Image (cartoon, rainbow, N blue to C red):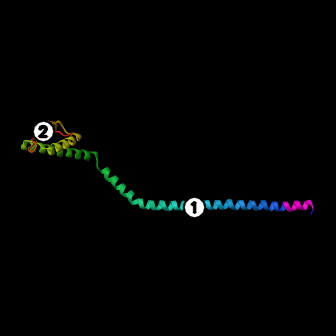
Amino acid sequence: MEWYNWLTLFGGSALFGAIAVDIYVKIKYSSKKVIERKKKERDDELGRLISGVVKKELEPVKQEISQVKQEITIIKSDDINVLRTANRDSLRNQLLTVFRECQFKGYRTIEDIRNFEYMFDSYKNLGGNSFMINIAEQMEHIPPQIDTKNLNCTNTKEN
């Protein structure tokens, strides 16, 4: 065999090998693209499916929230002021009732003191006036209940 026969023999197989490798790379590359494209399509479809289900499930909740917002906007600041005033006046009446009961009894118990202080703090926070401050001062002058078992006076204020 001559040298050109050997060259042709090796050149042909080298050319065939190069073509085979090229075809293999293209097939492998395109199959990766196909797999990636199918995965992306599957993910997109799954995302659409999930968003559709979530949207369907959340729609009633959105409607309920919308209704609550509408109801809240109905309540005006004037209504809130009216409610605040009514609550303050009710506390004023309760404070006077506790004060008058203690005056009638001639002493005040720990429960009377606690109730009066809690209600008075709320009354002040709602914008109560100085009339009840005078009543609170008078309440402090009513003697505490005497504990006949221990012969001690209970504290007039708690810390």
Q: Quadrant of residue 8?
A: bottom right
Q: Which amino acid is tagged 1? A: Glu
Quadrant location of the N terminus in the rendered image: bottom right
Q: Residue at x 55, y 60 (%)?
A: 43
For this view, does 153 lie left or right of residue 21?
left
- What percent of the width, then of the height, locates residue 57? 42, 61
Which circle's residue, 2 or 1, is located before the other in the chain? 1
Seen from the viewer's position, the closer of residues 84 and 17 is 17
Span colored in magenta: 2-10
Say the numbered circle drawn on residue 6: none
Q: Residue at x 34, y 56 (%)?
A: 67
Separation of residues labelled 2 and 1 (CA atoms): 79 Å
Q: Is residue 8 magenta?
A: yes
> Of the residues shown, which amino acid type is indicated by label 2?
Met
Q: Residue at x 44, y 59 (%)?
A: 55
Look at 23% across and 45% down and name the residue there: 84
Task: Name the spot of residue 54 as percent of width and height, x first.
Answer: 45, 60
Residue 51 x/y as whole percent: 48, 59
Q: Circles 2 and 1: CB distance less than 8 Å?
A: no
Return the residue at label 1: 41
Q: Residues within 10 Å of mark 2 (few under 14, many from 20)?
A: many
Q: Residues within 10 Å of mark 1 (few under 14, many from 20)?
A: few
Position of residue 65 relative to residue 145, above or below, is below
Q: Which residue is mark 2?
A: 139
Q: Where is 126 relative to 4, above or below?
A: above
Q: Nearer the viewer, residue 61 or 71?
A: 61
In this picture, is 1 found above or below 124?
A: below
Badge 1 marks a residue whose secondary structure is helix
Magenta stretch: dominant secondary structure: helix
Above or below 47: residue 150:
above
Q: Residue furthest right?
A: 2
- Residue 153: image x %, image y %? 11, 40
